[in-house]
Amino acid sequence: MLFEKISVVGLGYIGLPTAAALAARRKKVIGVDINKNTVDIINRGEIHIIEPELDMVVHAAVTEGYLRASTTPEPADAFLIAVPTPFKDDHEPDLSYIRAASYSIAPVLKKGNLVILESTSPVGATEEMAKWLAVSRPDLTFPQTHGENSDIRIAYCPERVLPGHVMRELVENDRVIGGMTPACSTMAIKLYKIFVNGECIITNSRTAEMCKLTENSFRDVNIAFANELSIICDEIGVNVWDLINLANHHPRVNILQPGPGVGGHCIAVDPWFIVSRSPNNAHLIKAARKVNDSKPKWVIDKVRSTIDELLALHPQKNRSDITISCFGLTFKANIDDLRESPALAIAEEIAELHHGSVLAVEPNIDKIPSQNTKIELCSIDTALQGSDILVLLVDHKEFLQIDSELIKDLKIIDTRGCWSKKLKA
Ligand code: SAJ
C-alpha cells in the first residue's frame, strides 16, 4: 500500500479536519503540532476549534486508533504541511512557520516520501520549502535537482474549504495539485483520492500557489466593489441592498454583499501575497484591500454621527446616557471565529470612543478575549430593551429572526442589510 502512515503537520483549522478526513478513511494518521495543549486535547478525542461535525470524526478516529497527535514528527509515507503563513508589518509574507515545519520533518524523511504544502503561500514557497529540505538532508535527492527521479516527491495543493462547511467541502471540492514534477503530481493525486470525491486537477507548483491567491483576491475585489457601492449609495440616498438585488437580476451581474469590512485569516491576507510579489502591477488588488480595510472606519464614523443625531433629538440626554449595542463580533455569520474580525475591531473602537455603556450580543462565544474593553456580553433581549443605538455587524441567524416591532423605534446602523430589509417590509 502506497500510504500506510500519513503525517499532518499543523493541527489548526485546516490540518485537523484533513487529518480527521484521512483517518476516517482508515489511514494511520500522526498529527504534529508544536502546541502541547492542542496535542493533549486531540489525544483525548476532543477538539480545540469549533467546526460542525469535526468533533465526531476526531473522536471516532482517536478512539479507533487511526489518529494520534504528537509534538514531534516521526517517520511516515507522506507529510502534509498546513501551518500558518501570516504577513509581517509591511505586508510581506512570513514563511517562518513553513521553514520551521520543513526543518522539523527533514530528519525523519526517507526515500519514496511525498511532502505536500497546503498552507496559503506566495508564489515560489514550495520551491523554497524544497530547498530547506534539501539543505537538511544532503543524503536524499529532491525534484529541483533530480527531476522525475528524485527520492522525495514534492507538491503544492491549496485548501479551499469554507469555515463552517469544512468537513463537507474537504470531500466534495475539486483540488488543484501542483507537483514540482509530473511524478510528484501523480503521487499527490493518489493521496488526495483517499478522501476527495471532487476532481483533482494537475498543474505546476507555482500556478497552484497563484491559483489559491487568485481565488481569494477575486473574492476580496468583488467584496470591495460591494463595499464601495454601499458608501456611494449612502452618500446619494440610494438603498444599496435594493440596488444590488435589482442589478443581480441581470444575467451576467452577480454583486456580493457589503459588510463592515473583510475579516478572517484568508481573504484579508492572501491578496497581499500577490501585491508583495508584483507591487508595481497589482493596482486593483491593492486598492480592493484598502477599500475593505477602510470600511470599519466608515462604520465608526456612522456611529459617531448617529450619537450626535440622537443628542440633537434629545437635548436633555448626555453622551453617557446613551447605550450602544453591537450585534455580532465574529468575522462572519454563524461561526465562533474572531480572527481579524472587523466586527470585533468596530465594537472595541466604539467602547474606546463612547462614554456610555457598550453592550455586545454574540451567540457563538461566551467570553470576549480583549483585555481592556468595557464591552459587556448580553442576551438579545437585554440589548433590545436597554439600548438607544443598535449596530448590526454580523448576520447571525438569531438576529435575522428578531421581530421588526422590537427594533423599529431604535436608531439602527445595519452594516449587513438584514434589518433594513425587514423594516421596509
Ligand atoms: N464577506 C462580505 N460580503 C460577502 C462575502 C463575504 O463582506 O458577500 C466578508 C465576510 O463577512 C468575512 C469575509 O468577507 O468577513 C470573508 O468571508 P468569506 O465567507 O468570503 O470567506 P472565508 O474567509 O471564510 O473563506 C475563504 C473562502 N474563499 C473563497 O470563497 C474564494 C474559502 O473557500 C477558502 O478556503 C478560505 O477563504 C481560505 O482558507 O483561504
Image: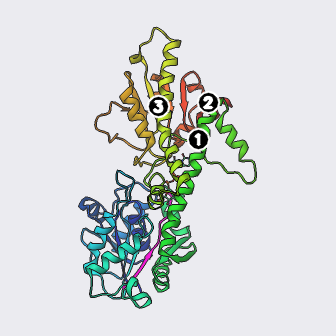
Q: How crowded is mark 2: few (under 14 residues within 10 Å), some or many (20 or more)?
A: few
Which residue appears farthest toward the top when viewing the image?
Answer: 316
Badge 3 or badge 1: first in the primary sequence: 1
Judging by the rendered image, the residue that carries numbered circle 3 is 300
Determine the residue located farthest toward the bottom in the rendered image: 149
Asked whether the beta carbons under mark 3 and mark 1 sit within 8 Å of each other, the answer is no
* Residue drawn 38% across the image and 27% down it: 353
Residue at screen point 45% across, 67% down:
123
| SS at mark 2 in the image | helix
Q: Is mark 1 on a helix, strand or loop?
A: helix
Disc 2 and disc 1: Cα gap in Å? 11 Å
Residue 44 is drawn in which quadrant? bottom left
How many numbered dots are placed on residues in this image? 3
Would you place residue 305 above or below residue 299 in this image? above
In reply to whether residue 167 is colored magenta, the answer given is: no
Q: Which of marks 3 and 2 is nearer the N terminus?
A: 2
- Residue for badge 2: 235
Q: Residues within 10 Å of mark 1 (few under 14, many from 20)?
A: some
Quadrant of the drawing holding the N terminus: bottom left
* Badge 3 element: helix
Which residue corresponds to mark 1? 228
Task: Report the span colored magenta.
Answer: 152-163
Q: Which amino acid type is shown beneath numbered disc 1?
A: Glu
